[in-house]
Image (cartoon, coloured by chain):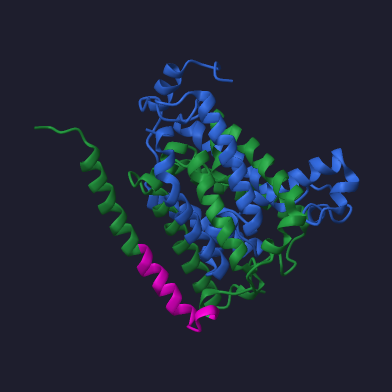
Amino acid sequence: MSAPFYVQGLFGEESSLVLAVLIGIGFGFFLERAGFGSARKLVAQFYLTDLAVFKVMFTAIVTALIGVTCLSRIGWLDLSLVYLVPTFWAAQAVGGLLLGVGFVVGGYCPGTSVVSAATGRIDGLVFVLGLVAGTLAFALAFPALEGLYVAGDLGEKTLPEAFGVSWGSVVLAVVLLAVGGFAAASLVEKRMAAKTAPATD
Amino acid sequence: MASVTPDVVQDALADNPAASRPYTNPYLAGIGLGLVLLASFVLMGRGLGASGAFNSGVAWLVSLAAPGYAGSNAFLSRYLEADTHPLKTWLVFEVGGVFAGALLSGLLAGRVARTVEKGPRVSNATRFAFAFAGGGLTAFGAALARGCTSGQALTGGALLNLGSWIFMLCVFGGGYAVAFLFRRQWR
C-alpha cells in the first residue's frame, strides 16, 4: 500500500490527532530555530536586510517538492490523494495582498505569531488576538464577501496543468529559481550591510 | 499594557545576544521544515497550516455566544459540522503542537523572554496597536485566500498548486508595496 497512509485508512482519526501534535511540534521547532518568532527578523525580509524568510521558505518548498516527486515516481506516494486547495485565483490574489500588508504592519503571519507568543513576545500574543478579531470580522462580513470568495474559480489546478508542461520541468524551474534566488539574496544582504554600516574613514 | 516593563529593559532583553544562542542556518532550518512538511504529506495526505485553526476557534466561540447565528453563517457553519467538538480538528491539534515545539526550541536556545519586538523609536502601545491591526489584516486575507503562509504558500508551494503560487507572489508584493510606510516601527 502506498502513502498517504491516513487517506488509505492505515490509522484512524484519534491517531491522526496525535500525529497532528507531533507534526506541529516539528513545525514550530524549526520555525523558532530559524528565528521566525522574532518580528524584526521576519520583517527584515521586506527591508532587504535579512532574507532568511525567503531562504527558509524556498529551501523547505524545494525539499518537500523533491521529496513528493521522488516518492511518487517510485510509486510509494499517490500524489492524487494529497489534498490540494482549489484555486480561486482572484480571491487568493486579494487575500495574499492583504496578508502581505498585514505581515508588514503586524510583524508576523498566523503561524509565526504562535511561535512568537510561545517564546514570550507580548506583541506576538497581541497579534494572535488580532487574528481572532480578523477571523471574526471576515465571518461576520462573509455574506457580503461571498462573491469575492469564489472569484476566479479554476478548481484543483497545479502549475504543470495550468501551463500545459510536465511536472518535472516545473520542478526543475522551481529548483533553478530557488538556487538563483539564494545567490541573489546573499548579494542583496551584503549590499545592504555595506550601505547601512557606519563610515569608517 | 505599555507599562508592563520599561522600554529600556525590553530593548536590552531583545538585543542581548549573550543570553541566547544564534539562530540556525536558514538552509538547515529550511530542510528541517521541508522534511516535516514531507512527513505530513506522506502520513496524512495534507500539509501544514495555521489560520484554519483560528477559523475553528472563532466558529466555536461564536457557537457559544450565538448558536443560531453560527449555524446560519455560511463561513462558520462549515467548521461546526457533525456531532464532534468544533475544536477537535487536525489543525487545532497541529497549532497546539506548533506552540509546544516553538517553546521547546526557544527554551533550548535560551530565547524565551517576556519582551516586545519593535524598533527603539515606537512605544509599546503603538507596537501593540500595529500588531493587533496586522493580525486582523492577515486573518482576513488568509480567510479569503483559504489559507495563510503555512497552508497556502508553504504547503501549496511544494505541491505546485497554482492558487498557492499566485497567493505567495501577492504576499511578497503586498509586503514590499507598503514596507516603506511602516519602517518607523522597526528602525
Q: Is residue B127 above or below residue B51?
A: above
Q: Is residue A89 left or right of residue A169?
A: right
Q: Can I make out residue B92 in this image? A: no
Q: Main secondary structure of the magenta part?
A: helix
Between residues B146 and B50, which one lies in front from this camera angle? B146
Residue B163 locus on image (x, y percent): 57, 67
x, y percentage for residue A52?
Answer: 39, 48
Residue B161 percent location from the top left of the image: 56, 69
Task: Residue at 50%, 41% (x, y): give it.
Answer: A105
Whether the magenta-drawn stretch holds residue A164 is answered as yes
Residue A149 drawn above or below residue B16: below
Check the rendered structure and report the hue given to chain A. green
Q: Is residue A24 visible?
A: yes
Q: Position of residue B174 (x, y in %)?
A: 48, 53
**Relative to A70, residue B164 above or below:** above
Q: Colour of chain B?
A: blue
Of B61 and A140, which appears nearest the observer?
Answer: A140
Asked whether A28 falls inside the magenta stretch, the response is: no
